[in-house]
Amino acid sequence: MDGDESLKHTNIHNIPVEIIRAIENDSYSKGNADISVTGLIQSPRIRLLHKKHQTELTSDYADEIWKVLGQAVHTILERANQDQEDTITEQRFFYPVNNWVVSGQTDSMSVNENTLKDFKVTSVRSIISALQDGKLDWERQLNCYAWLYHMNTGKKIDQLNIIALARDWNKRELQRRGGDYPSTAISVIKIPLWTTKKQKEYIEQRVSEHQTSNLNFDIDGNLPLCSDEDRWKKKDTYRVLKKGRKTALRVFDSMSEASKYVKGNEASDISIEHSHGEFARCVGNYCGVAEFCTQFNGGKNG
């Protein structure tokens, strides 16, 4: 899934035509490549479901408003930095891997700092999560870019940064919450840099997985299953409940912790309720193909 050129749109909320034109004016292209880094790190199942149902997929223009902001930010930053000797902007690199050509476009490369940077327009919640726990998709994406840059130039990257712009940052919220709330609307997030060997192995593995999935899909229409990680599965929880009480006494991440708490509690009528963590990506249709996915709706192949 490297873009939905045939995606049909609706305009339920009567978005003005000027905005619609901006949404449709997306110049993204993976170039003359078999797969982009964006597609490479994507679940093969999701990519193939987009391919299978490309003529049936629809999206409302109102749901793509943030794409305009993202494009605007990238365009402005590219224009402001394109003539600077210390910065390389919006450059796409290509490299063959196992008979496929992989491509990736870097947002910005700081020559003096030898730092590869990628700009993200995202939410405060996403930024806080990335700062506290990391964000694996960003880590994979930037390390793939670093490897492509190295293979094309012979030079190695020293540092990877995400420049995150919080579209919902609020000064009053900062004053109210403090703590982990970002101090400004712009956050610089350092991304772990892998060894060149690890970068290469990851890209080769992903290319192989996508190639195998394509072959199986072409032969018999079978689709690989998404992993819990692909589906953004939330943690299972174990809620300690007391009869007659509406809220849980405690919530634990494991049955052993919950059981230990129950054994040490002298109260009667206590039970443990196991709540399975939801698959957030599926439930929210963040993949864009949940309605066609029988792994989510029942069954295994769809």
Image (tube, rainbow, N blue to C red):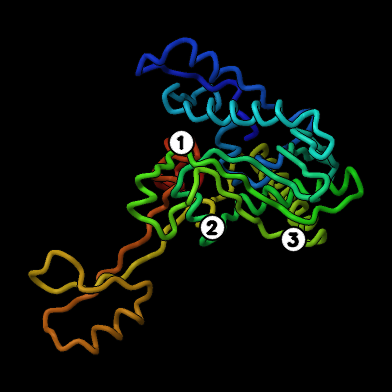
Q: Given contact means CB atoms under 8 Å apart, are the residues at marks 3 and 1 in contact? A: no
Regarding mark 3 in the picture, which secondary structure is present there?
A: loop
User: Which residue reaches farthest left?
Assistant: 244
* Residue at the disc numbered 2: 131
**Quadrant of image for the N terminus:** top right
Please give the name of the residue rendered at 56% of the width and 31% of the height, measured from the top-left corner: 70
* Badge 3 or badge 1: first in the primary sequence: 3
Q: Amino acid at mark 3?
A: Trp
Q: Amino acid at mark 2?
A: Leu
Q: Is residue 37 left or right of residue 148?
A: left
- Disc marking residue 292: 1
* Residue at the disc numbered 3: 194
Regarding mark 2 in the picture, which secondary structure is present there?
A: helix
- Disc marking residue 218: none
Is residue 302 something that shows in the picture? Answer: no
Please give the name of the residue rendered at 29% of the width and 71% of the height, measured from the top-left corner: 251
* Residue 60 image point, x, y percent: 43, 23
Give the image quarter of residue 248. Answer: bottom left
Circle 1 residues within 10 Å: few <14, some 14–19, many ≥20: some
